């Protein structure tokens, strides 16, 4: 279900996307689906040798979740830009919530667009990924 984009205003908040706890199965499935089988994400022995306490989520998994947040709010065909900064590790046991907020409405290359700031946070309020997207609104 998409939002009525013609009525969007600066300050509007996208409906949050809450995800199940990050577990080993999620990491293995994402690794296989994405082709990212880096052992730091799926092999606890490898992760520990690298100085980590355990495996942790792929950054691109978090970005994919943010993409899902955006495309549940607006049709994918209207997405003009989407970029993120990885700010922290998403550990096993984290419960991730994806959030977004409209911060600007502007004409970009002759097209009316909104800029949406997005972020993933865990259950402790720690930001793991932050970024923004540009979405055409008509």
Image (tube, grey):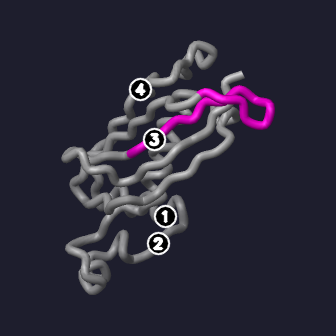
Local packing at callout 1 (Cα closer than 10 Å; few below 14, some 14-19, many 20+) is: few
User: Nearer the observer, disc 1 or disc 4?
Assistant: 4
Question: Do the residues under discs 2 and 4 have CB atoms within 8 angstroms?
Answer: no
Q: Where the C terminus falls, by quadrant?
A: top right
Callouts 1 and 4 close, C-beta under 8 Å: no
Residue 25: which quarter of the image?
Answer: bottom left
Asked if the stretch drawn in magenta spans residue 115, the answer is yes
- Badge 2 marks a residue whose secondary structure is loop
Distance between mark 1 and mark 4 Cα atoms: 29 Å
Residue found at the very far right of the displayed protein: 110
Is the residue 10 above or below the residue 70 in the image? Answer: above
* Left or right for 34, reference 124: right
Residue on which disc 2 sits: 37
Whole-number angstrom distance, CA of label 4 to CA of label 3: 11 Å
Q: Which residue is mark 1?
A: 32
Q: Residues within 10 Å of mark 2 (few under 14, many from 20)?
A: some
- As measured in the structure, the alpha-carbon distance from the residue carrying label 2 to the one carrying label 1 is 7 Å
Residue at (61, 27) in percent of width and height: 105
N-terminal of the two: label 1 or label 3?
Answer: 1
| Comparing labels 1 and 3, the label whose residue is closer to the camera | 3
* Magenta-tinted stretch: 105-119
Q: Is residue 22 left or right of residue 75?
A: left
Residue 36: give x, y in percent of width and height: 50, 68
Secondary element type, mark 3: strand
User: Which residue matches tag 4?
Assistant: 15
Q: Earlier in the sequence, mark 3 or mark 2?
A: 2
For disc 4, the neighbor class at 10 Å (few under 14, some 14 to 19, many from 20) is some
């Amino acid at each position: 279900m998409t939002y009525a984009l013609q009525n969007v205003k600066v300050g509007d908040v996208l409906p949050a996307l809450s995800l199940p706890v990050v577990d080993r199965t999620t990491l293995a499935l994402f690794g296989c689906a994405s082709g990212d089988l880096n052992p730091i994400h799926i092999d606890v022995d490898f992760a520990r040798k690298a100085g980590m306490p355990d495996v942790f989520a792929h950054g691109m998994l978090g970005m994919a979740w943010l993409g899902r947040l955006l495309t549940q709010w607006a049709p994918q065909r209207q997405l003009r830009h989407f970029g993120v900064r990885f700010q922290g590790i998403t550990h096993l046991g984290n419960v991730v919530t994806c959030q977004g907020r409209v911060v600007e409405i502007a004409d970009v290359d002759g097209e009316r667009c909104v800029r949406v700031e997005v972020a993933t946070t865990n259950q402790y309020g720690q930001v793991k990924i932050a970024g923004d997207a540009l979405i055409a609104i008509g």
